[in-house]
Image: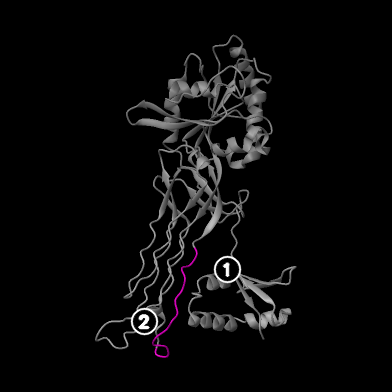
Amino acid sequence: MFYDYVKIYVKAGDGGDGIVTFRREKYVPLGGPSGGDGGKGADIVFVADESLTTLVDFKYRQHYKAQRGENGMRKNMHGKNGEPLIVKVPVGTLVRDAETGELLADIVEKNQRVVVARGGRGGRGNARFQSARNRAPEIAEKGEPGEERWLRLELKLLADAALVGLPNAGKSTIISRVSGSRPKIADYPFTTLHPNLGVVNLEPGVSFVLADIPGLIEGAADGVGLGHRFLRHVERSRLLLQVVDMSGLGELSPWEEFGVINKELALYRQDLAARPRLLLANKMDMPQAAQNLQDFKQHLAEAGVDYPLYEISALTGDGLRELMYQVFEMLQTMPMPPTMDLTSDEAEGKITKVTAEPEFVIAQEEDGVWRVSGSKIEKLVVMTDWEHEESLRRLQNILTKIGLDDALRQAGAQDGDLVQIANREFDYAE
């Protein structure tokens, strides 16, 4: 089964907890704090694998959770870092944040590595808080939570050349003739329901990758007939091979077929319509094909279209070998299409904004609870070790310094009101 669009959940490992301990050894008076730091939580890393051609594995496993770091230990020993969770993805995978649509990565090279969720740092043990003023601190931090998010993965096939055309134009027969690909072939429209990749091996050292894109129809650029899903796979191809049915047995004439595909490519992306292209006059073994070809050539001349035209028959194989050699020669001088720009807003859903986040935001819920939100303040609360009074005093001092007490009072909080930050609740007091 071919899958080119999936949604998955990733959760990086939390950092290990720092601990509060003191040296208790004979002949070592006032040994001091010796609590070690927690280890870093594991990252989740996507790695491009050339052997994968579909996202089908993610259909059966949609949740990925990495291991947390080990807790700190006595004698200033730090916890072990979590081992990164390696997830293999096909070359050509786009990674987006499912909620915002922001493009996070464009994976286009073999063995390319992308960290999609970073593990939390380990909490500091009490040895880190020793100072001239506090020689025996009972302060430690919990590990920082690892990043978690829903991701949207989209696959765009990486092929040197792509066959495009209306349904039943003969694209699948062509790729089956010139490569080892064996797509489903039948004499009715929409036989091909997903893209097929084939390697064209002409002789040792002379090969390229050819894609068979399912038949496009009018309105494909607007998503009709899964048009967006199919057109996406054309974007990375350097050369387009447009297959035109010359048999005259279809509903449209060859010139009308050419016009439909040309229009849909331009509507989807202007640079696709301008990409190098060869026209393949297919089914030249049919009785009316020669006359239809003459009419087609006349229309091309009148419209000023000068794409190279090749006469072929996918059924008999006539003209295919010469065509494939020509395709190989043309590819030698063609640059790869540019990868997606992670900072541009050209594509749908690509959002990259840098904004200054406030220290905290205060809002009163319907039940009267004051909710304080903000990534920095929530992280501070989550990483506080609630088992030690000194850690709690440190938290209170920080909250006072950043102005939370004053802000709550100005917002209207009264003595005894409930204040919620992250997963903790407090009673407000003047």
Q: How many marks?
A: 2
Residue in front for this viewpoint, 148 or 290: 148
**Is 10 situated above or below 161?**
below
Q: Residues within 10 Å of mark 1 (few under 14, many from 20)?
A: few
Q: Is residue 273 visible?
A: no
| Furthest-left residue in this view | 27
**Could you say which disc has been placed on residue 219 in the image?**
none
The span picked out in magenta is 132-145
Answer with left or right where residue 368 lies relative to residue 40: right
Look at the magenta stretch and give its main secondary structure: loop
Task: Say what secondary structure mark 1 lies in.
Answer: helix
Viewer-closest of 233 and 370 = 370
Way the structure is coloured? one colour
Q: Does label 2 or label 1 sit earlier along the sequence? A: 2
- CB under 8 Å between discs 2 and 1: no
> Disc 2 marks which amino acid?
Pro
Q: Is residue 295 above or below residue 229?
A: above
**Rendered location of residue 226, percent (x, y):** 63, 34
Residue 418's quadrant in the figure?
bottom right
Residue type at tag 1: Ser
Does the magenta segment cover residue 66? no
Quarter of the rendering occupied by the C terminus? bottom right
Q: Secondary structure at mark 2?
A: loop
Disc 1 target residue:
375
Residue position marked by numbered label 2 in the rendering: 33
At which x and y percent is residue 405? Answer: 64, 82
